[in-house]
Image (cartoon, grey):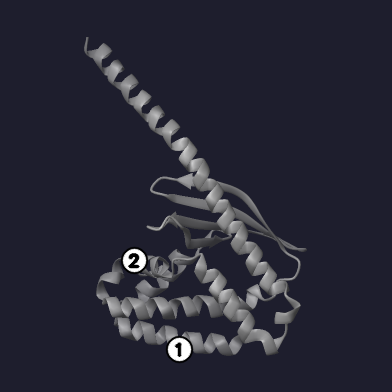
Amino acid sequence: MTGMSSMKSLLKMAALALGVWLAAGPAWADDEQSVRQMMEGAIQKAISILRDPALKGDVKREERRAQMRDTLLAVTDAKRVSLLTLGRQRNKFSEAQIAEFTETFSQLVFVTYIANLEKYTDEKVHILSIEMQPESKACVMTKIIGSSREIPADFSLFKDEKGAWRVYDVKVEGVSLVSNYRSQFSDLLVNKTPDELIAVLKQKVKENEKLS
C-alpha cells in the first residue's frame, strides 16, 4: 500500500508539473517573441548608427557616440548591472554612492568598448537561439560574423516591473562582463572605500577617453 501511495503521489506531482509547463508555454512563446523583437531592434539601430554616412569621421564622433550610448542604455538596466558587479560589497555603499557608481561604471564600460564598436564594417550579427528561463529571464545566443572570424556573444536579460526586457550581462567568447568586473571590484574594495573605488573608475574613464 505504501508503494502504491508513493507512486500515486509521484504521478500527481508529474501531472501538476506538466500542467504548469503547458500553461506557461503560450506565455513563454509571447515573451520569446518580445525578446527577439527587442534584440533585433537594438542591433539594427546600433548598426544603422555605425553605417550612417552623416555620422562618420572624428568631427561627428561625439554625436555618433551619444546616439550609440542612448541606444545601448535603452535596452540595459545599468543599475542592475552595477549591483551585480558589486555583489556582496554593495552593502558598503549608500544609495547616493550606488547612483554615482552606476553612472561612472556605465561610462567606463562604454568608453572601454566603443572604439571596438566603431571598427564595425560589414560584420553580421545573427541571433542563434533564445532560451527562456524561470523568474522572467532569458538568454539570447548570438554570433558576430566577420570576414576573418566568428565571435559568440550571449546576452542575459530579465523582464522588469514595467514588462520590458532589459540586458543585465553579456558573455563574449564565454567571458562574463559582470563576473570579470566583480572580481576586479572585490579585490579593490578590500583596501578601498566606495568613494575611493568610484574615484579610481573616474580616472580610468578619463584615461580610456584619451585612448579612444
What label sits on residue 183 in the rendered view?
A: none
Indicate the amino acid at tag 2: Gly
Is residue 191 visible in the rendered image? The answer is: no
Q: Is residue 18 left or right of residue 3?
A: right
Q: Position of residue 93 (x, y in %)?
A: 28, 76
Q: Amino acid at mark 1?
A: Gln
Give the spatial CA distance, label 2 vs label 1.
22 Å
Q: Tell me: 151 left or right of 96.
A: right
The residue drawn where x is 36% and y is 82% is 197
Do the CB atoms of the residues marked 2 and 1 lie less than 8 Å apart?
A: no
Res 192 quadrant in image? bottom left
- Quadrant holding the C terminus: bottom right
Q: Please identify the residue farthest to the front as the structure is shown.
A: 162
Number of numbered labels in the structure image: 2
Q: Secondary structure at mark 2?
A: helix
Circle nearer the N terminus (2, 1): 2
- Badge 1: residue crowd in 10 Å (few <14, some 14–19, many ≥20): some
Is residue 177 visible to us here?
Answer: yes
Residue closest to the far top: 1
Which residue lies under the disc numbered 1? 203
Residue 87 bears which disc, if any? 2
